[in-house]
Amino acid sequence: MSKPPANRFRPSDHAFAAESLAQIGRGYVVPDRVALITGCSSGIGRELALALHRRGTIVIATARRAESLQELADLGIATEALDVNSLADINRVVYAIKTAYGRLDILVNNAGYGQMGPLLELDTRALEAQFRTNVFAPMALARACAPLLRSRNRGLICNIGSVSGVMPTPFSGAYSASKAALHSLSDVLRLELKPFGIRVMTVQPGAIASEFGRHAESSLRGVLAPDSWYKRSEDAVHARAVESQQNATLARDLAKRLASELLRKRPRPVLRYGNKSKLLPWMARWLPRRIREWLLLRRFGLRRLQANP
Ligand SMILES: NC(=O)c1ccc[n+]([C@@H]2O[C@H](COP(=O)([O-])OP(=O)(O)OC[C@H]3O[C@@H](n4cnc5c(N)ncnc54)[C@H](OP(=O)(O)O)[C@@H]3O)[C@@H](O)[C@H]2O)c1
């Protein structure tokens, strides 16, 4: 793990961590919880690492590119390179945590991205990649971390879902389905892990200011062919990709709220936060399907296509 400044608690230094654990017995105050967060290069993950660190949690902030974590490392946060799609990376990081701390209290599965585009124009590889990162990777991390989370009978797995998983829209079908799957897996995990003292919560953010829109836009590269059925609605496809960045709530605000929730004795099973995080689920639940679909067809330029085949 990276080296924080010498005058700070150095959670990345194994010997130092062992000494800190020993200090517990001698009555010294040491940070209370150990938290592993994925996808900390920007946005929600980065802000959450900072928010938890400020509250005295030992944070292991991870991202695929180690250099993107330098700022966090400079603040004394332990950092590790971790591509959530690499089982070797996952095992290496979990082993390092086990060696350094002997426990883990909180796992935040935050890393993710939005594969945008009309469903039939996404090839199978794009769909598989979306599910690999947003669904299978969080499960692999949960599996690898479970023994450490169980050790103190108060572990917590926090999966970052999305309001898109509750209210799917055109041109975000792959992303919405991946987040809906993550919500569903989390609901079952919550029950299956309860007997072992591991709690599971889902966060369903609304629009949050981050790099999400930029990554979603680049996911569209090569998706719309020149003879695409959706060519005339291309603007709507691109607008959907960056929609999360319109009137977005600050990632810092979500992180502050989430950090408080994660450190509670009984965190709520589902947390909705951010612009439209209440409105969209309300629409999904209460608006008659016909009205909802009429609104979506209009909003995403699909009525335009219908009128001019
Ligand atoms: N922003 C929103 O409006 C919004 C709304 C609802 C839900 N969410 C969810 O919130 C989570 C965080 O997104 P964000 O808004 O903070 O966007 P972001 O700024 O784009 O951050 C996404 C993070 O995930 C990382 N990531 C992607 N694939 C990865 C992989 N294979 N291995 C490791 N890291 C990977 C990115 O790393 P790189 O820098 O290496 O790409 C980045 O650190 C995501 O799960 C997203 O679906 C966001």
Image (cartoon, helix red, strand yellow):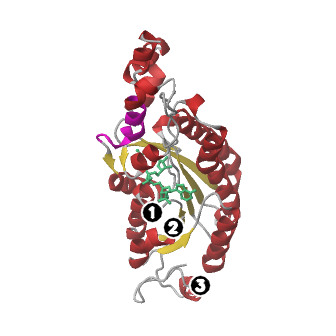
Image mark for residue 14 = 3
Q: Secondary structure at mark 2?
A: loop
Q: Is mark 2 within 8 Å of ligand 1?
A: yes
Q: Amino acid at mark 2?
A: Arg
Residue 279 versus residue 296 in the image, above or below: below
Residue 228 versus residue 196 in the image, above or below: above
Determine if residue 103 is in view: yes
Determine the image quadrant of residue 25.
Answer: bottom right
Give the x, y percent position of residue 19: 56, 88
Q: Amino acid at mark 3?
A: His
Q: Residues within 10 Å of mark 2 (few under 14, many from 20)?
A: some
Q: Residues within 10 Å of mark 1 (few under 14, many from 20)?
A: many
Q: State the residue position of label 1.
A: 41
Image mark for residue 65 = 2
State yes or no: residue 244 in magenta: yes
> Which numbered disc, 2 or 1, marks the residue that appears first in the sequence?
1
User: Considering depth in this image, is 296 or 254 the residue closer to the camera?
Assistant: 296
Determine if residue 287 is in view: no
> Which numbered disc, 3 or 1, marks the residue that appears first in the sequence?
3
> Which numbered disc, 2 or 3, marks the residue that appears first in the sequence?
3
Q: Is mark 1 within 8 Å of ligand 1?
A: yes
User: Mark 2 near mark 1, Cβ–Cβ under 8 Å?
Assistant: yes
Give the x, y percent position of residue 62: 52, 66
- The structure residue drawn at horizontal position 46% and vertical position 37%, both measured from the top left corner, is 163
Quarter of the figure with the N terminus: bottom right
Image mark for residue 201 = none
Give the x, y percent position of residue 145: 66, 62
**Image: magenta residue range:** 236-247
Q: Nearest to the eye among marks 2 and 1: give it.
A: 2
User: Considering depth in this image, is 46 or 274 the residue closer to the camera?
Assistant: 46
Residue at the top extreme, as displayed: 307
